[in-house]
Structures are given as structure tokens and as C-alpha cells.
Amino acid sequence: MEFNGIFWGMLFVTAFAAYLIGSIPTGYLIVKAKTGKDIREVGSGSTGATNVKRVLGKKWFFVVMLLDALKGALPVVLAEHFVPFGAWGIYPVIAAIFVIIGHSKPVFLGGKGGKSVASGVGTILALNWQVGLILAVVWSIITYFTKYVSVGSIIALVLSPFLMYLFKAPVSYVCYCGIAAIYVTYLHRENIKRLIKGEENKVR
């Protein structure tokens, strides 16, 4: 791969487009349309599926989760198939990184978004569907038995780089999963504090 102007230009376009797609505030838009409320003023203040459930119930929890996962997968798929010079998986990884940043720090909502779990799993599904499906199952099982969405989310994402390695994915994919795991865990820092204190909300 030649690191020329075209490479850096496409890298910028990929990152910028992925960030804008990630910034689409799915949960905020749905809650606003259904109730007129600003979800950032409800519960945890997150625009993610878990907080949407507090306002609209289980059905919309799954709808928002699915839409956020699709939002995460879309830029990665586009980068894989339509961006030239795709050796080493650099462009899909850049798309994945910036879409989860966009979800958690959306330009359209002044930087206050969700915790990038569903969008993160969406990126991983697009990079390696087997790993993505395993993570979805792990998240479901852990969340079901512990009743804590945050615990399921953190454990699933922390497992992702190891699973990518086991499935012999490109090194760039393994590195991305490590970055995503650290980032998502950081976004859950308040949840971790509440878990330690025994104050974290359980799934009802």
C-alpha cells in the first residue's frame, strides 16, 4: 500500500463519513417522535437502547438496539467494499472506530450520546460475523443471568479481541476490538462505580 495523498484523503473521508453516520441519534429521534421528550433528560441521560427502554418499553429497546447495530455495521461494510487500497483492513477499522465515537459523541446532540455497545457489536459483526454473533449470545446470556445490561456489555466487548484472534482475523481487527473494549469500558465508568456500590439498576 502506498501512503500517498489518495490514501490520506480516502482515510479522512472514511473517518468523517463514519462519524456522521454514527452521530445519527437513533434513540433520541425515536423517543422525541413518540413522546416529545428529550431522552438526555431521562434516566441515565444516554441515548442508547437501555435508556430508551425506560421510556418506551422492551419493544423499542430491541428496535433501537437493532438500528444502532445496523448503524455500526453500515460504514464498515461500505469501507470494505467501496474504498480502494483496502489492504490490511485499515479503512474498515477506521470506519469502525469513528462510528462508535460518533454514537457516543454525536455532533448533532452536542457530544452527548450512548455507550456504543450495540453500534460496537454492529461493527464487529461487519468485520467478522461469527465473532459478532458469539458476542451477541454472550451479552444475552450474561445480561439474562446477572440482570445487569452493563455487565453483559462490558464482558462481551472485553472478550472481542480474544475471539477475533482465535478466528484468525487480521491484526488490525484484533487491535480495533481491543480499542473498542477499552473505550466502551471507559464509557461505562459510572456504571462500574454503581456496580461496586450495589446501586446499579437491574433489568426488570
Image (tube, rainbow, N blue to C red):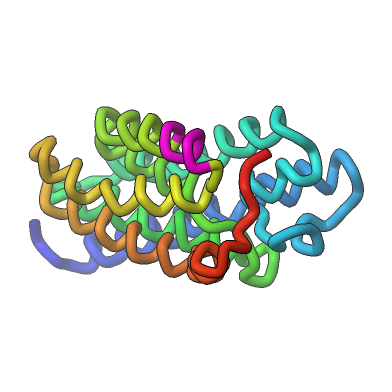
Residue at point 60%, 59% (across, down): 200
Write down the quadrant of residue 12 in the picture.
Answer: bottom left
Q: Please, which residue is most extreme toward the front here?
A: 198
Who is closer to the viewer here, 52 or 74? 52
Query: Was residue 144 drawn as part of the magenta stretch in this picture?
Result: yes
Residue 142 falls left or right of residue 112 = left
Decide whether the magenta segment is chiefly helix, strand or loop.
helix
Residue 147 falls left or right of residue 156 = right
Residue 179 falls left or right of residue 25 = left
Q: Position of residue 136 (x, y in %)?
A: 40, 33
Write down the quadrant of residue 176 in the picture.
Answer: bottom left
Q: Is residue 73 visible?
A: no
Q: Position of residue 22 (x, y in %)?
A: 53, 53
Who is closer to the viewer here, 177 or 51? 51
In this figure, what is the number of numbered marks?
Answer: 0
Residue at point 30%, 53% (across, down): 158
Residue span colored magenta:
140-146
Q: Is residue 172 visible?
A: yes
Query: Was residue 122 drawn as part of the magenta stretch in this picture?
Result: no
Who is closer to the viewer here, 131 or 29? 131
